[in-house]
Image (cartoon, rainbow, N blue to C red):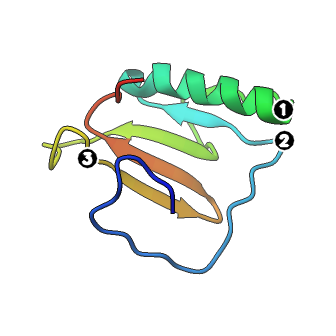
Amino acid sequence: MNLIPRPTNMKTTRGVLRLNPSTSILADPIARPAAERLAAQLRTATGWRVPMRRSGKATVRLKQYAGKAPGPESYMLTVASSGVELIAPDEAER
């Protein structure tokens, strides 16, 4: 799996997440700039609308750690057939 930074721990399971024209993104305020960049890239690549949500359910969710993060570039990425959730301490550098 090509992820940067490389995960220190990874567990893979069965299942597939397929993005589709109803794909949407929900982000905490600190993650909003990264979410906007992701939405723009998905729009360009797919031609889909990819709306940004302020609340409710979304296919892709970007969140900030609720407590103290394990490290400055730490993250938790969960991918399931229902969607993707990325939790990080702050917005990563571009």
Residue 77, by quadrant, is bottom left
Q: Is residue 36 visible?
A: yes
Residue type highlighted by circle 2: Pro
For residue 27, above or below residue 9: above
Q: Residues within 10 Å of mark 2 (few under 14, many from 20)?
A: few
Q: Residue at x 60, y 30 (%)?
A: 38
For residue 23, above or below residue 79: above
Q: Residue at x 48, y 50 (%)?
A: 85
Q: Residue at x 35, y 24 (%)?
A: 93
Marks 1/2: CA–CA distance: 5 Å
Whether residues under marks 1 and 2 lie with C-beta atoms below 8 angstroms apart, the answer is: yes
Residue under label 1, please give it.
48
Image depth: mark 1 or mark 3 in front: 3
Element on which disc 2 rests: loop
Residue 30 picture location, percent across and down: 36, 23
Q: Residue at x 72, y 33 (%)?
A: 42
Quick one: quadrant of the C terminus?
A: top left
Instruction: Check residue 21 in the rendering and tell me which mark sits there, or answer none.
Output: 2
Between disc 1 and disc 2, whose residue precedes?
2
Element on which disc 1 rests: loop
Residue type highlighted by circle 1: Trp
Residue 24 picture location, percent across and down: 68, 37
Residue 75 picture location, percent across and down: 32, 48
Who is closer to the viewer here, 5 or 48?
5
Residue under label 3, please give it.
74
Residue 55, by quadrant, is top right
